[in-house]
Image (cartoon, helix red, strand yellow):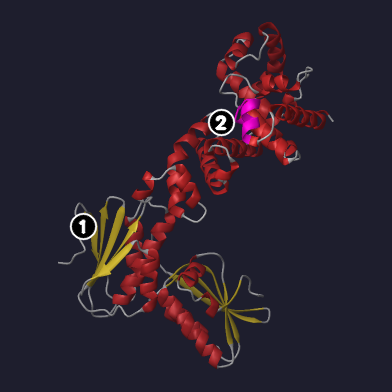
Amino acid sequence: MSEATQPQSVLVAEVNLPHGPRAPFVARRIVGALITDAPSSRAVDATLLASEVVSLMFHDEAGLSVRVEESGRRVRVTTSTTGTFDLGDEMVGTLLDRLADGWGHGDREIWFELELVRRQALTHLSDEELFSMAPMDRDARDEVFSRYVGWAASVANRYRRHGSHFDDVGQAASIALINAIDRFDPEFGVKFTTYARKTIIGTLKRYLRDTTWSVRVPRSLSDTTVELNRARAEVEQKLGRAPTAAELADELGRPREEVESALEAAMAYNAKSVDAPVSDDDEANLLRVLGSDDEQFDLADIWYTLEPLISDLDVQEQEVLFLRFFEDMTQSDIAEVVGVSQMQVSRLISRALERLRTQLTG
Amino acid sequence: MGLGPQLVVETTRIGSHDVVVAKGEIDLASAPRVEAALETFSGQEVVLDLRGVEFMDSAGLKMLLGQRSRLDESGGVLRLVLGEGAVMRLLELTSVSDAFSISHTIDG
């Protein structure tokens, strides 16, 4: 026996390979089939290494077998021969060094191990530490992904209606999450969730607009949108503030979920919905239109809708708007972050809003 | 996951190029078939289209290195046509991509 067996390892399978040059091919198929639930790139690495080792050990007369064991997140593949082998092959050594997380050999066997899921050690790292590794490090990326994939699904959850395909939406959210992880830079000065939410919602809206709006949104929803705009103005006048989705639902005598859908539809598909009559206090008004207390009615929606216009603003205006409307910071807090006076923040916001309004109405 | 034919090799002429097209998996068992197709040429350029190759290990790579040298010595050249897949990755992992003339299309 060799040093190859780890404590707590579970034998998945041990298979004798056929004699002849098809042995590497069969070994690949076996290893590929036994390694499930792994990131595909790692499973591919495992099949490549299995093929290499079996090729190295191949002699017409030798009997070869492959053993696959699991130990926690590690998979160990051990190839044994009844004959001998020569590890002098540089290329096989290079590949084992580069792709395996550990490997070794006895007189009649070669084993290698791969971490098939994220590395355990990374779970102790903070998000900040992970993000400083992320662009280069696949494991850091996997770790961040696993931390936020559930959250991304919950963000996407609101879009799982109108008969849109459940899995499509989840998949779009996961892809958006990966994009957000790749592009996020802690230097942005915003929380990752803030940034990722914007990316996810933006992606879903593009996705729904491209695939859903013209074909799947029920007609009653479009009608509700029109009705909604009337009701919102009325209720707002009555209450002296923006109504919540629940209050609008009451007013309209419709289910809250339908009202929320209509609100989203209006935001996603019709930039004019923010081009409402605006009073003399621009900021308060836009906030009222954009910033309902109802958390379901998210500022990120508006941000995305306005994004093409916002990107025309100068950098400082963009930053201030982002902090004010997206991060929901007060003018004084923004002043501190940006390093200008609160008065300047106020002026920057007014100027930016004025330009946005001109572009929307112009 | 069938155990069926693992590699299809075809020799053809496309424009002014002699082209060997391989599709499938290149390893210990199948590399000799690519080698046999390449060995019908010498003293000229041969284009080996590997874009349809889903898997290649170092047995395939050694065969390619051998054929590259052989064609070189005969005054010819072996040019590989590659996508972003398994073959390119193997060349990079083993740091031998510089040893080959590589392009993304048959015409170079």
Residue depicted at x 60% and y 30%? A327
Q: Earlier in the sequence, mark 2 or mark 1?
A: 1
Q: Count residues near mark 1 (Cα–Cα under 10 Å), then give few for <14, some for 14-19, many for 20+.
A: few
Disc 1 sits on a residue from what chain?
A: A
Instruction: Confirm whether the magenta stretch covers residue B48.
Output: no
Marks 2, 1: nearer the viewer:
1
> Can residue A301 be seen here?
no
Q: Position of residue A78 (x, y in %)?
A: 26, 65
Residue furthest out toward the left? A1
Residue furthest out toward the right? A362
- Within the image, what quadrant is residue B61 found in? bottom left
Q: Which residues are magenta?
A: A326-337
Q: Position of residue A300 (x, y in %)?
A: 62, 31
Q: How many marks?
A: 2
Same subunit, labels 2 and 1: the answer reads: yes
Task: Tell me: residue B8, above or below residue A283.
Answer: below
Badge 1 is on which residue? A6
Distance, label 2 to label 1, CA atoms, is: 47 Å
Residue furthest out toward the top? A238
Q: Position of residue B84 (x, y in %)?
A: 55, 64
Q: Position of residue A97 (x, y in %)?
A: 37, 68
Residue in the foreground of this view, choosing between A293 and A74: A293
Q: Amino acid at mark 2?
A: Tyr
> Can residue B45 be seen here?
yes
Q: Is residue A328 left or right of residue A282?
A: left
Residue depicted at x 51% and y 42%? A174
Q: Is residue A222 left or right of residue A294?
A: right
Name the image quarter holding the C terminus of chain B.
bottom right
Instruction: Specify the label residue A159 is tagged with.
Output: 2
Q: Of helix, strand and loop, which one carries label 1?
A: loop
Q: Amino acid at mark 1?
A: Gln
Task: Tell me: residue A222, above or below residue A238.
Answer: below
